[in-house]
Amino acid sequence: MPRKTHHVVPNSDGGWDVKKGGGERSIKHFDTKQNAVDFGRGVSKNQESELVIHKKDGKIQNPDSHGGDPCPPKDKK
């Protein structure tokens, strides 16, 4: 089963977007990255998905898992 993801990505016109993994359209647009991350984290927790935060150049900065992890840490069993 593929994992669900949400992404915080830079918008080519400026600002930041939160998108569902594999989606073309933005769920919501923000002027600041921090606001996009905060919103995306809430969506990710609600949907039990992984939040993937990207840098300005589009590379992955860091993922943040909120459930559905196929390999949970041993101390989280």
Image: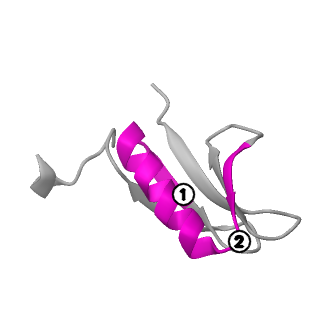
**Does 17 lie within the magenta span?**
no
The residue pinned by badge 2 equals 31
Figure quadrant of the N terminus: top left
Give the residue number, with chain letter if any, for mark 1: 52
- In the rendered image, residue 58, in percent from the top left (x then y), is placed at 73, 66
Instruction: Name which residue lies at 66% across and 51% down.
Output: 28
Queried whether the magenta region covers residue 30, the answer comes back as: yes
Q: Position of residue 12 (x, y in %)?
A: 87, 64
What amino acid does circle 2 point to?
Answer: Asp
Reply above or below: 1 against 18.
above
Q: Is residue 44 left or right of residue 28?
A: left
Magenta part of the protein: which range? 26-52
Give, as a three-letter code, the residue at label 1. Val
Identify the residue at horizontal 46%, vertical 47% (top origin).
Answer: 43
Which comes sooner in the sequence, label 2 or label 1? 2
Residues tagged 2 and 1 counted as in contact (Cβ below 8 A)? no
Position of 41 with respect to 52 (left or right) is left
